[in-house]
Image (cartoon, grey):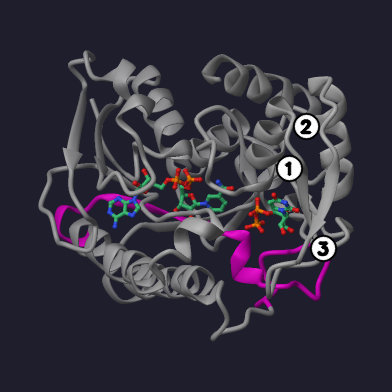
Amino acid sequence: MKRVLVTGGAGFIGSHLCERLLKDGFEVICLDNFFTGRKTNIKHLLRNPFFELVRHDVIEPILLEVDQIYNFACPASPIHYQYNPVKTIKTSIMGTLNMLGLAKRVKARILQASTSEVYGNPLVHPQTEDYWGNANPIGPRACYDEGKRCAETLMFDYKRQNGVDARVVRIFNTFGPRMLEDDGRVVSNFIVQALRGRDMTIYGDGSQTRSFCYVDDMVDGIVRMMNMDSIAGPINLGNPVEFRVLDLANLIREMTGSDSIIVQKPLPPDDPAQRRPDITIAKNILGWSPRIALKEGLELTIDYFRSRM
Ligand code: NAD
Ligand code: UDP
């Protein structure tokens, strides 16, 4: 039985990943400092004898005997990663260094959760893995974008220099149950606002685009990436169907039967104007593409938030 470490395992994607890995017959160690993660996300796993929970901060080294490491620890929503930007960049850089040190020592395979944010405000559309990006190194998003870019650098340097079996997935906007109600990301914001009958807040004129992937599809791509025999470069994972933020707001308003009003708020600095993954490599190498359409995923997510309110 393979033992797997999931850092950030009590978070949104991490908790779904832990669940899937247990189903697949892995023994799972979930490590989290509970900054944005919650015990309720993994409460149902605690009675499983093959699941262990460790409260730990990835900024500090840790020694564990594991075969695979999924390094997901890092706040992902702009309001959370900008709350303490120095801590965010420390989490990406020192956390990844610690996990790479562990991988090297115990000869574990390691997969880093990177992000579409490494492309910044992209000038190439859709984004292919060979695009180096257009990120502002000193803006308010830099603690996250540059932290993740540096984490990627560390992964490939440990691979070249130390022979660590390191893999990188670039995750595009992912949504689903267990997103935090108040984490400020667009899908959870719009659903919660619509269900409460509050104003739905569009930043800017809503013409900016994102491509939204349902969490189960994302987790499937991540697990495939970890379990392929050999992988060279980073791989984009996301749903290539692109939506304008304004259209997303209207769709959620209609699906929830809400009479909320759509209002405009200022566009945050450095907010990318467009984003869509080119997933040709994921299709060809991992045999992966998303199966759950936006509307189907939104129905499941709306049900989740409705049940919590
Ligand atoms: P999340 O905030 O729900 O999960 C992050 C988890 O990491 C939380 O449980 C948090 O408590 C934990 N954490 C944060 N700092 C830590 C530290 N120093 N030590 C230990 N644990 C720490 O976010 P998510 O959406 O589940 O994102 C998970 C990963 O996927 C992140 O690395 C994120 O950058 C990446 N990602 C997510 C998206 C997305 O759309 N959700 C997109 C791109 C990349
Ligand atoms: N957004 C919005 N209203 C909100 C929250 C976000 O219009 O209440 C916009 C935001 O400006 C961005 C897009 O939705 O253009 C996606 O934002 P999110 O924070 O979910 O993800 P990211 O910007 O990191 O892709």
The reply, left or right, for residue 216 in relation to residue 163 is: right
Q: Earlier in the sequence, mark 2 or mark 1?
A: 1
Crowd around label 1: few <14 · some 14–19 · many ≥20 (10 Å): many
Q: Amino acid at mark 3?
A: Gly
The residue identified by callout 2 is 294
Q: Earlier in the sequence, mark 3 or mark 2?
A: 3
Where is ligand 2, by quadrant? bottom right
Q: From the viewer's perspective, is residue 147 above or below residue 70?
A: below
Crowd around label 2: few <14 · some 14–19 · many ≥20 (10 Å): some
**Secondary-structure class at tag 3:** loop
Give the distance between the C-alpha atoms of the residues marked 3 and 1, in whole angstroms: 23 Å
x, y percent for residue 278:
76, 55
Residue 81 is a magenta residue? no
**Secondary-structure class at tag 1:** loop
Q: Which stretch appears magenta?
A: 104-133
Q: From the viewer's perspective, is residue 60 above or below residue 161?
A: above
Callouts 2 and 1 close, C-beta under 8 Å: yes
Residue 106 is a magenta residue? yes
x, y percent for residue 33:
25, 48
* The N terminus - image quarter: top left
The residue identified by callout 1 is 239
The residue identified by callout 3 is 204
